[in-house]
Amino acid sequence: MDLFAPKHLLLVLLIVLLVFGGKKLKTLGSDLGSAFRGFKKAMSDGEAEDPAKQIQGPAVKDAEFPEVAVQLSGCFKSAP
């Protein structure tokens, strides 16, 4: 007895159709498809960006504790 036999899959599909209804399954499928398209688009846009931009740190100093930000910025400079 195969777990994924066509009869079993049709039975599961029929039960899901009865529980959720056709309209709900249609909207669920379209939402899932748009989510996949958005994910693929975000992944391709992320690869196209300049890698140097992704590595850079924040351009602004800490507004709440400016003296700590100035002290810490000196710690990360390379030694001559």
Image (cartoon, helix red, strand yellow):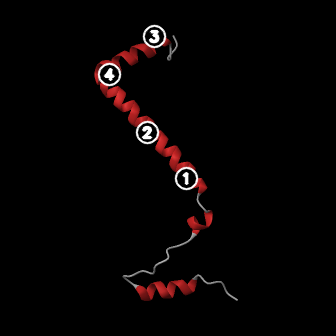
Residue 27, percent from left and from top: 34, 31
Q: Secondary structure at mark 2?
A: helix
Q: Amino acid at mark 3?
A: Lys
Check whether the beta carbons of the residues at disc 3 and disc 2 lie within 8 A of each other.
no
Residue identifier under label 3: 7
Earlier residue among tags 3 and 2: 3
Against 22, residue 27 (above or below) is below
Q: Amino acid at mark 4?
A: Gly
Check whether the beta carbons of the residues at disc 3 and disc 4 lie within 8 A of each other.
no
Total number of numbered discs in the rendering: 4
Of labels 3 and 4, the one closer to you: 4
Q: CA distance from mark 3 to mark 4?
A: 20 Å
Q: CA distance from mark 1 to mark 2?
A: 16 Å
Of labels 1 and 4, the one closer to you: 1
Earlier residue among tags 1 and 3: 3
Residue 65, percent from left and from top: 39, 84
In this picture, residue 50 sits left or right of residue 71: right
Earlier residue among tags 3 and 4: 3
